[in-house]
Amino acid sequence: MKKTLMILLGLLLAPIPAVTAELTGAGATFPQPLYSKMFDVYYKTRGVKVNYQGIGSGGGIQQLIAKTVDFAASDAPMTTSEGEKARSEILHIPTCLGAVVITYNLKGNPELKLTSDMIADIYLGKIKYWNDPRIQKLNPDVKLPKLVITPVYRADASGTTFIFTDYLSKAVPEWKEKMGVGKSLNWPIGVGGKGNPGVTSMVQQIEGSVGYVELTYALQNKLPTALINNKAGKFIKPNAESASKAVGKNVPPHMKVSITDTDSPDGYPISSFTWILVYRDLSYLKDVNKAKELYNLLWWIIHEGQEFATPMNYAPLPQSIISQLENNLKRLVFGNQPLWKI
Amino acid sequence: MENLKALIQRQSGNIIYRFASIKKLLNFDKILKISLFISAALVLGIVLGFVVTLCVASFDFLKSLGFSSLLKDTWNPLTDEFGASPFIFTTILVSSLSLLLSIPFSLSIAISLSDKKGNKLLQSFLNTSLDLMAAVPSVIYGFWALFTLSPLVRLLQTKLGFAPMGVGLFTAVIVLTIMIIPFSAGISREVIKLVPQELEEAGYSLGATRYEVIRSIILPQAKSGIIAGFILSMGRSLGETMAVTMVIGNFNAFPKNIFSPANTISSLIANQFNEASGLHQSALIFLGLILLVITLLVNLAGAFILKGSRR
């Protein structure tokens, strides 16, 4: 009798430390709607509150380096110099995939095919009109007008620009040489809009304009999107499925890798992981319970959490990488204690 | 019962007495003086801290690239090139142009609002609208410019044979003009009201027409105050961020013509600051310092002229 009472008492008291745990993260704005949903569900089912602030990937990384947050989120992997500043190993945990789509404003919203060369030349100002013979030849079913093409880019520094230019740099040598990869570039032509909504409103207003926005944003707002050729030569329509398929067979175990211009034959070529970044050694959190909660949260995100991706137009992680990710998470330690064993 | 009443009375008298003695102890004049001094010192301290922080944070940029790199015209965070001259130029251009454009409107508004023989009902209606215009958040102006003004600009561009972008320098100047009219008109109105009525009446009694009174009596009398008002409102337009960012086109180079997309200092900072780090961030902070200096100079000029007019 006494024993059962003790067990009951233990059960009653056990959830209390879990409820008091609170995790803080900051970073990318792109996965923020998904994270908000995930963390809300996580709080309701596990009783652990997660505060997430969408302050931008760069800001998140800076806060992680300053150790003012428990985890950061980023659309671009950490640079070497950022890695050096952190001084301690940081793990990149993919949480879902994003893709960048090319949208445009043409009468009748025709479905266009575009190649990487054409996109690069449009943004370099070399293709000036829609009825350019190269675009017309690739799209014989569409009668393209003699209309000036106005490229629209992101005026704010953004992970979307990073993914877009990362793709163009891999696929088009001239782009790599003249423009490079980055969150904000020195654009030779066009107009800039702030954020996905800014680019979209410019594209919707300027006839003949072309812009690049996040896949989720384009799907939610039903924007026309171009089919892009991948390395296998297939023209791929951007959606959550083709973005997930961009994860090829050759993903290295650390997952800190760009998957744009993918080898996989059905993958959309302008796709990318979005990551949560954590220190491998979480002893700086001072509290082993907190470190364990963070481990639990990450484990939950790559398993149960994935079901929230597709309904919200995010591309879920493909099954093929989950076991590798589990191994990566098992590397998390608190001092010299592996967290998964606690 | 009676006892209780007496007790309460005695007690409350006691409290009042005590309160009065506290009042005597504390010198309210002194308290007021100290609290005013603290508030004033706080303002000064905040501004000073501001300048110091900006200087310290932009030191990295100055140390590694030097002042002269500002004069270059390429802004490319990828290659650590931070030529700021296009932004400084565009900032000054946009605010001067909008100031020039706003002058005829604000001046006529100010004159009609301060006219002592005008229709009082109409004047109070206009006054309220002017104050309301000043209170509208700039993002609202930005939205209006993006969705109403820029399609009109696009029509104009098509007529004139420019690429129909709708956003750019021209649109930004127009929306800024509208935004600063309530400020410059408001100050001018107050200055014109200060012109002595005797002077006006003297003018009329000499047979001057209304136009002649305005031109040769009111305007010369209020001249320096009006100019100061315009300069102060230019100070406001220099720092305007939201509305400008939404319609200027955010193109990081010198504008080629009046319709070109361009970028001002404040819209560049608004766009790039949240993801900037290292030298990029330092360069943006230095641009903020430059904007602060420009605004300070413009405001000082305005204050100087205003002071001259009071003599």
Image (tube, rainbow, N blue to C red):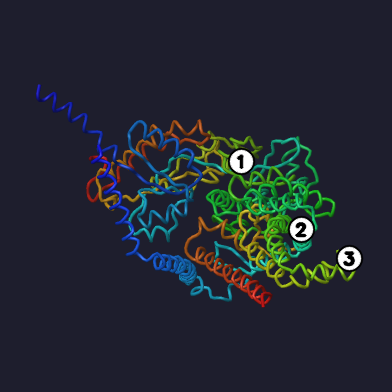
Q: Quadrant of the N terminus of chain B?
A: top left
Residue with the mark numbered 1 = A233
Q: CA distance from mark 3 to mark 2?
A: 19 Å
Question: Residue placed farthest to the front in the image?
Answer: B2
Q: Chain of mark 1?
A: A
Amino acid type of the residue tagged 3 in the rendering: Thr
Q: Residues within 10 Å of mark 3 (few under 14, many from 20)?
A: few
Q: CA distance from mark 1 to mark 2?
A: 65 Å
Residue with the mark numbered 2 = B109
In the image: residue B106, left or right of residue B75: right
Amino acid type of the residue tagged 1 in the rendering: Gly
Q: Residues within 10 Å of mark 1 (few under 14, many from 20)?
A: few
Q: Is residue A180 visible?
A: yes
Question: Residue placed farthest to the left in the image?
Answer: A2
- Where residue A339 sits in the image (x, y, percent)? 26, 43
- Same chain for marks 1 and 3? no
State the residue in front, B265 or B212: B212
User: Which residue is rendered at x = 69% and y = 47% of the image?
Assistant: B144
- Where residue A310 sits in the image (x, y, percent)? 50, 32
In the image: residue B39, left or right of residue A341: right
Amino acid type of the residue tagged 2 in the rendering: Ile
User: Which residue is rendered at x = 52% and y = 50% of the image?
Assistant: A159
State the residue in front, B141 or A208: B141
Query: Closer to the observer: label 1 or label 3?
Result: 3
For label 3, the SS is: loop
Residue with the mark numbered 3 = B209
Q: CA distance from mark 1 to mark 3?
A: 81 Å
